[in-house]
Image: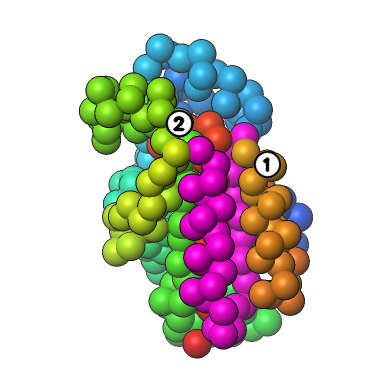
Amino acid sequence: MTIKIVTDSTITVAPELIEKYDITIVPLAILIDGVLYQDTDLSVEAFMEKMKASKALPKTSQPPVGVFSEVYDKLAEDGSEIISIHLTKALSGTVEAARQGAMLSHADVTVLDSDFIDQGLTFQVIEAAKLAANGATKEEIIAAVTKTKEQTELYIGISNLDNLVKGGRVNRVTGVLSGLLNIKIVMEFVDTTLQPMLKGRGNKTFQKWLDSFETRISGRKVKQIGISHAENLAFAMHMKNQLQPLVDQEIPVLDTNSTVATHTGPGAWALMIEFEK
């Protein structure tokens, strides 16, 4: 029985991997100054420019239930089963829309909440796709994806609090003061919530965290690392160069997706790491 893999556009992954493993991506929608776009319609550069120029924070919305149902039915026309893996429910109702779509569909669909986003989601999707390509059973794939999830950690660095202020996550006075003082924040995504780890002035804050992180994980076997950024290629590449000796696999450095960039704003980065058990 063939198993096909579905995910959503909050995945950050090299396009050639999507093509190689024939992964189906269902796009979220994004509203910018009254204009609705499919997440996949805008290049990273175009989205960042529109976001900076917009009067209000762009709003993302989950794919309609009916879209999921249609996608599943089409993929299952040849009798295939489907495993659909999506971004954490803490940031979007996408996984619930996928579950409702699966109920309406005539296909055999298993919907999984990755509890992550960006390359944290990628780790699980690519693991599932590799196993599916090698003929693994649905149960084997779900077990492997669960293991990947359990061994993954996600960290985010915020350079500018403007988007957090617009989104109501930080009050405006704090945002203005942080901008004036050049405050940087590093957070970890723990149990589907962002927990502040370090706050300080200037880019030395990021370097301080990176050095302590490298020390903390020394001695642990690393399976893979992924680095994403929103207009902060310089520090993203710096992280790659510092951490590459810890892992055999080449560390991908990619532009993040519009959903992540909407929350973090420009200058942000994300580091995702999966450990061997």
Horizontal arrangement in the rendering, residue 219 relative to residue 19 (left or right): left
Residue shown at 49% from the left, 57% from the top: 209
Callout 2 crowding tier (Cα within 10 Å): few <14, some 14–19, many ≥20: some
Residue shown at 34% from the left, 22% from the top: 176
Task: Return the residue at label 2.
Answer: 182
Q: Could you give the CA–CA distance between mark 1 and mark 2, rounded to whole angstroms?
A: 19 Å
Is there CB contact under 8 Å for labels 1 and 2?
no
Q: Closer to the N terminus: mark 1 or mark 2?
A: 2
Rendered image coloring scheme? rainbow
Q: Position of residue 122 (x, y in %)?
A: 56, 61
Q: Position of residue 169 (x, y in %)?
A: 27, 35
| Vertical placement of residue 135 versus 20, above or below | below
Highlighted range, magenta:
202-231
Q: Three-letter amino acid code at disc 2?
A: Asn
Residue shown at 61% from the left, 78% from the top: 223
Query: What label sits on residue 233 in the rendered view?
Result: 1
Q: Position of residue 220 (x, y in %)?
A: 55, 83
Which sits in the foreground, 136 or 189? Answer: 189
Label 1: which secondary element: helix
Q: Does 221 appear in magenta?
A: yes
Query: What label sits on residue 203 in the rendered view?
Result: none
Residue shown at 56% from the left, 63% from the top: 211
Which sits in the foreground, 71 or 189? Answer: 189
Horizontal arrangement in the rendering, residue 63 relative to residue 231 (left or right): left
Q: Three-letter amino acid code at disc 1?
A: Leu
Horizontal arrangement in the rendering, residue 16 relative to residue 69 (left or right): right
Q: Quadrant of the N terminus?
A: bottom right
Which sits in the foreground, 35 or 215? Answer: 215
| Vertical placement of residue 68 versus 48, above or below | below
Would you say residue 123 is visible in this rendering? no
